[in-house]
Amino acid sequence: MRKLQMVDLKSQYDKIKDTVNNSIQEVLDNTAYINGPQVHEFQKNLEEYLGVKHVIPCANGTDALQIAMMGLGLKPGDEVITADFTFAATVEVIALLQLTPVLVDVEPDTFNISIEAIRNAITPRTKAIVPVHLFGQAANMEAISAIAKEHNLYVIEDNAQAIGANYKYADGSKKKVGAISDVASTSFFPSKNLGCYGDGGAIFTNNDELAHTIRGIVNHGMYERYHHDVVGVNSRLDSVQAAVLNAKLPLLDSYNEARQAAADKYNAAFAGHANIVTPVTKGDKDSHVFHQYTLRILNGQRDALMKHLQEKGIPCAIYYPIPLHRQKAYLDERYNEADFTVTNQLVDEVMSLPMHTELDDEQIKFITDTVLEFLT
């Protein structure tokens, strides 16, 4: 059996080595390392794939989210509602811009932001909602969009973990996540479903004026060299990373399908176990692209199981061990523990197993057998 890894980038690269190497060689040959033709090609290809008017590449996913908020013109003190159970980058950029983060609880089944919690958190100072499509599953965008419309709020999708997922509306129509809201961000960190070989990110929007503003922000506020029209940053996707992403984008759907197939096998092995809660997919199968495969382990056995798996050479991880409202940087007397009952339970129960495009049946069987032997 091949060595188990949380993400097997080496095996993935081996299958596309020639295509990736040729793409990178083009950059080396033309020496246009910043804003080269590969960046523009990737931008157009991703716009077509997502069905969105504007893709603005940038240096990483955290920058993408920050720049999206800068583009909307949010002001210090404006309240931004987002999920308590997610990676810190989501709240980090809110704080960096001197906006006021408002953390709320999540759903117990999908782990995505709670619609009821959003409604309860809205005040006259609320200006935006940031749903996170956590672990690869589309959040309830129809309900979130309705709330935003009712209260005249922006919606900013944090799509760092779910690129390629589809959101299904009540009428049966579908849209790619990232193409639904006022503006969205994503990350191309190497372990993502569409990952480069360094750092990278992008912002998506269908708003022409907003896209123009954001294109200036990512490039020091310039539309014309040495003319700084808006306050900007230095955040550009380099041509080498764009070349890698161009090579991988045509394979994204097959990558996501491989992850979904692996999740199906995990689910089948764990079905009916009293102390294992497997991931729930709401909507059609393609609404969840399994950036992570995250279980809930009941009866206080999570930590002991993790230790056992690690002793057997099976990597596993906790995403996320500490809720954001308890993080030292984001402590706030406004928060009441009673408002985070789901998140506080999840941090004690969740555990993620290896999930990537190269998982094979032998590996999945070894992982699931080892889990079940311990929990039986």
Image (cartoon, grey):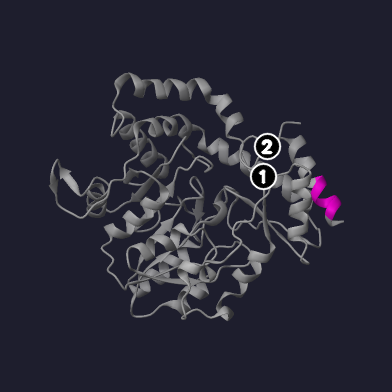
The quarter of the picture where the N terminus appears is top right
Q: Is residue 193 left or right of residue 368?
A: left
Amino acid carrying label 1: it is Pro
Q: Position of residue 14 (x, y in %)?
A: 58, 25
| Residue 192 visible | yes
Rendering quarter of residue 49: top left
Dot 2 crowding, Cα within 10 Å, few <14, some 14–19, many 20+ = many
Total tally of numbered discs in the picture: 2
Q: Which residue is mark 2?
A: 359
Is 225 situated above or below 246?
below
SS of the residue at dot 2?
loop
Q: Residue at x 29, y 59 (%)?
A: 70
Q: Which residues are magenta?
A: 369-374
Is disc 1 in contact with disc 2, using a CB cutoff of under 8 Å? yes
Rendering quarter of residue 31: top left
| Secondary structure predominantly adopted by residues drawn in magenta | helix
Q: Foreground residue, 51 or 224? A: 224
| Residue 155 visible | no
Tell which residue pokes out farthest to the left in this image. Answer: 227
SS of the residue at dot 1?
loop
Q: Residue at x 62, y 38 (%)?
A: 258
Q: Is residue 64 left or right of residue 284?
A: left
Q: Position of residue 192 (x, y in %)?
A: 52, 43
Q: Residue at x 38, y 55 (%)?
A: 65
Amino acid carrying label 2: it is Leu
Looking at the image, tell me whether mark 1 or mark 2 is earlier in sequence order. 1
Q: Is residue 372 magenta?
A: yes
Gap between marks 1 and 2 measured at Cα: 8 Å
Q: Foreground residue, 373 or 286? A: 373
Residue 354, numbered label: 1
Q: Position of residue 10 (x, y in %)?
A: 59, 30
